[in-house]
Image (cartoon, rainbow, N blue to C red):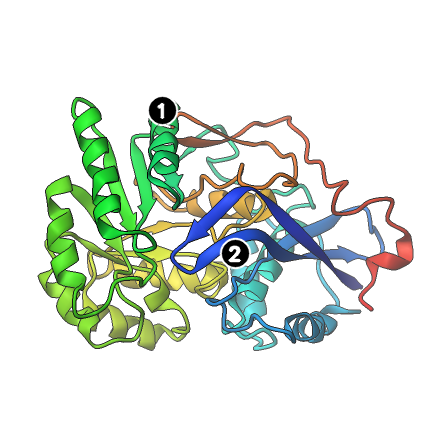
């Protein structure tokens, strides 16, 4: 019989993280643990990390709702021995039962991860693919908002560490100062091939978005993510007229049926979509987005929603299921002072998995008693 528990954990930022939506000092996460009562030492582990202001399911009742969903797993029959090659299909069939709505994207991602992990023997092996076989995932270096000196220091560290794709948050500071940062990068590193991605998080006003984008064109920008708030009719014009390729992120939140996804992409025709399983319907929901985008020659990449190494591990393995050589946004493993030690490490713009390195989950499960395994 299947058993389940959830564990709340507060991740602490190791620096003053700032976005266009304001500063962040911590992030709450809930970890789902699944096991068969015949062998409780083997368990699957998944992370639910809804983002305030973005995840529709986030709020005072989130934990109550999570417990209601997880209660459906208690005492459920579950075939433990994994059958080679069919775990993804088994996951799809499981979710087709309708017990979990994709509208609760962060919960879907957590349950998907825990189920896949359990199917593979509870080794944090979500997909047995090339990432585990020492084929790293290319990643961008994220530069957080802050003062001019702070941002320039981050840029220098990232480039020194071997990143050739840099992502900068824009829209939260004075626009001219943000242009100064971009100008500095292009002037100082003109001999190096540095790809610059921008993320506005919807911060530009719709009436001035195209003017600002035109001002940014001179910095040879790869793409700009979500220039205005989602759901505004002006986005169609911006996608059509922007001299910089537009990437959509928040625009995809709340779109869950395949037909809705097809209609949105056909209407807006962005150059790229940015996918976060925590926000975009879990891994199964993102798989649908990828198929819909590729049918229209729209590019895509996967980005973390500030997960711990548990969620990041699942994201990296999920990303490696696809033949994509573009840098992904998975370089957030070092942003927390109380993250979990894991086989993951970033080096020279690549996210690696070091086989043989162990997970340390003692912060999450300190001296756990058997009765605490169970859902209360």
Q: Where's residue 136, x and y in %?
A: 43, 32
Place of residue 251 in the rendered image (x, y in percent of width and height, measured from the top left): 33, 68
Determine whether the residue tagged by mark 1 lies in a helix, strand or loop. loop
Left-right relation of 57 to 199? right
Query: Camera-side residue: 278 or 45?
Result: 278
The N terminus lies in which quarter of the figure? bottom right
Q: Badge 1: few (under 14), some or many (20 or more) residues near its Cα, within 10 Å?
A: few
Q: Residues under labels 1 and 2: Cα distance?
A: 34 Å
Q: Residue at x 21, y 25 (%)?
A: 188
At 61% from the left and 61% from the top, the residue drawn is 111
Category of crowding for the residue at label 2, using alpha-carbon neighbours closer than 10 angstroms: few (below 14), some (14–19), many (at least 20): some
Q: Secondary structure at mark 2?
A: helix
Q: Please tell me whether residue 267 is drawn above or below residue 41 in the rendered image.
A: below
* Position of residue 22 in the picture relative to residue 206 (left or right): right
Q: Is residue 244 in sight in this rendering?
A: yes
Residue 362, located in which quarter of the rendered image?
Answer: top right
Q: Quadrant of the C terminus?
A: bottom right
Residue at position x 38%, y 40% in the image: 143
Residue underneath mark 1: 162
Quadrant in the rendering for residue 162: top left
Say which residue label 2 marks. 88
């Amino acid at each position: 019989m299947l058993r389940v528990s959830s564990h709340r954990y507060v991740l602490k930022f190791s620096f003053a993280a700032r976005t266009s939506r304001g500063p962040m000092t911590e992030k709450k996460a809930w970890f789902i643990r699944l096991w068969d009562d015949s062998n409780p030492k083997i368990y699957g582990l998944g992370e639910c990390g809804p983002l305030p202001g973005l995840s529709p399911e986030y709020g005072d009742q989130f934990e109550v709702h999570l417990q209601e969903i997880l209660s459906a797993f208690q005492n459920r029959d579950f075939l433990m021995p994994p059958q080679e090659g069919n775990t993804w299909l088994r996951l799809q069939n499981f979710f087709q039962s309708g017990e979990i709505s994709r509208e609760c994207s962060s919960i879907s991602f957590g349950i998907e991860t825990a189920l896949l992990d359990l199917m593979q023997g509870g080794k944090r092996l979500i997909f047995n693919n090339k990432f585990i076989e020492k084929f790293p995932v290319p990643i961008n270096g994220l530069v957080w908002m802050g003062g001019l000196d702070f941002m320039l220091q981050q840029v220098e560290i990232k480039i020194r560490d071997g990143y050739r794709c840099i992502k900068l948050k824009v829209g939260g500071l004075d626009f001219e100062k943000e242009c100064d940062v971009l100008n500095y990068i292009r002037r100082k590193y003109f001999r190096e091939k540095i790809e610059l991605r921008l993320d506005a998080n919807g911060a530009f006003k719709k009436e001035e978005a195209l003017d600002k984008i035109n001002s940014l064109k001179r910095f040879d920008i790869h793409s700009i993510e979500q220039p205005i708030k989602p759901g505004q009719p002006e986005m169609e014009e911006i996608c059509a007229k922007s001299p910089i390729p537009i990437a959509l992120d928040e625009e995809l939140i709340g779109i869950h049926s395949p037909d809705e996804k097809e209609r949105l992409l056909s209407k807006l025709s962005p150059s790229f979509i940015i996918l976060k399983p925590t926000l975009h319907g879990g891994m199964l929901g993102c798989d649908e987005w990828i198929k819909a985008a590729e049918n229209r020659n729209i590019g895509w990449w996967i980005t973390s929603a500030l997960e711990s190494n548990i969620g990041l591990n699942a994201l990296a393995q999920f990303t490696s299921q696809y033949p994509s050589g573009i840098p992904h946004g998975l370089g957030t493993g070092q942003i927390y002072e109380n993250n979990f030690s894991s086989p993951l490490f970033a080096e020279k713009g690549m996210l690696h998995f070091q086989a043989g390195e162990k997970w340390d989950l003692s912060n999450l499960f300190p001296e756990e008693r058997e009765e605490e395994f169970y859902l209360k």
